Image: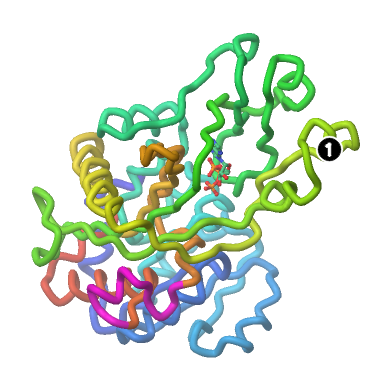
Amino acid sequence: MVPKERIEKIVEGYDKDKITVATVCSHTSLQIFDGARKEGFKTLGITVGQNIKFYDAFPKGKPDEFLKVDSYLDLLDMADELAARNVILVPHGSFVEYMTPKKFEELEVPTFGNRRVLEWESNRHMERQWLVSAGAEMPNIIEDPKMIDRPVLVKYDGAKGGRGFFIAKDYPDFKLGIDSSQRFTIQEYVLGTRYYIHFFYSPVRTEGYKLKKGVLELLSMDRRDESNVDEMYKLGAQEELKKLGLFPSFVVTGNIPVVVRESLLPKLLDLGEKVVERSIELFGGMIGPFCLESIVTDDLRIKVFEISSRIVAGTNPFISGSPYSDLLELDVSTGRRIAQEIKFAKDNDVLPEVLS
Ligand code: ATP
């Protein structure tokens, strides 16, 4: 991990009127660039052999400049060049996954948020320790595959958009599907509606839903379209499908906006608050956007199965705001909210508080 003092030193040398917001061209980059531009920042899109022509179709989401590299790992040797451009990196799921969390921690470039969250998030045991000790209810874990006595979901480590996950109802089912070369976790399969809740924690603002330090905002929610599980019901009973060689998979292909019944809102805010407060105790706090990935059961319990501690692709339906963010300020995407936070911190001379 790059020491905080090193990042502070780099930021000290920045021309604060020429900050460039940079990210990898993928995932949520359109709203990150659009939001940064709306807040008056220059923008830089990092690409590795991608087809960038699609940005021409969305001019407001196109970065001012592209930086082409052969591999994301090349960024590790480009710290000086990026610092000379006064760059602040905005992490997103693909950015961290392409570089790997370990290498991302080593980047000597000021990055929005607290990178110490990465080890807590990318290790499913630490993630669980964090969330459960914060008071969140999580799906049960089955330690021994031989003890599978109900539907479970077998998950591999790392954010892969559900790729490779499979449902098993007993040990033979598990053996049929497992790739034992990868680290895996077996979770009880929770029946309910899946909601992905998008929060934003600001350690530097003081107005709004107050935490011990800073404020928490609920910006939006989505649910995912997952291929092929979300469409499989059309083909009938699962056992029959298996006989035909059709197995459910969980590959995210799109996102759908959601609002929840209003009585769930206080519970969600309370949950978000506890998770942030615990993160402050454990590793100095998770800063900026994060998503609690949850399943709401029919008795209205919220079970959290994962946290993503940065901007998630589920915020993409809300480029010009959501029913929730509209009640904070109109026309604010999560990408724009990140840029606002950088601007607020810059104007109040507290940039190091939102960077690592
Ligand atoms: P990402 O990091 O991109 O969110 P991931 O690869 O870490 O994805 P998860 O988000 O943990 O995967 O799970 C993928 C999908 O599997 C979820 O979107 C959800 O549909 C389903 N899922 C996960 N956990 C459970 C569970 N315990 N019970 C039922 N369904 C689940």
Task: Indicate the secondary structure of the residue bearing disc 1.
Answer: helix
Q: Position of residue 237 (x, y in %)?
A: 77, 37
Location of mark 1 (residue): 241
- Quadrant in the picture for residue 239: top right
Q: Is 340 placed above or below 262 here?
A: below
Q: Is 275 placed above or below 46 here?
A: above
Secondary structure mostly seen in magenta is loop
The residue type indicated by label 1 comes to Leu
Q: Position of residue 104 (x, y in %)?
A: 46, 50
- Quadrant in the picture for residue 236: top right
Q: Residue at x 76, y 51 (%)?
A: 234
* Quarter of the rendering occupied by the N terminus: top left
Q: Which residues are magenta?
A: 318-330
Q: Residue 8: within the magenta?
A: no
Q: Position of residue 173 (x, y in %)?
A: 75, 21
Q: Position of residue 328 (x, y in %)?
A: 23, 73
Looking at the picture, tell me which residue is in the foreground, 75 or 32.
Answer: 32
Q: Residue at x 18, y 69 (%)?
A: 345
User: Does the image show residue 77?
Assistant: no
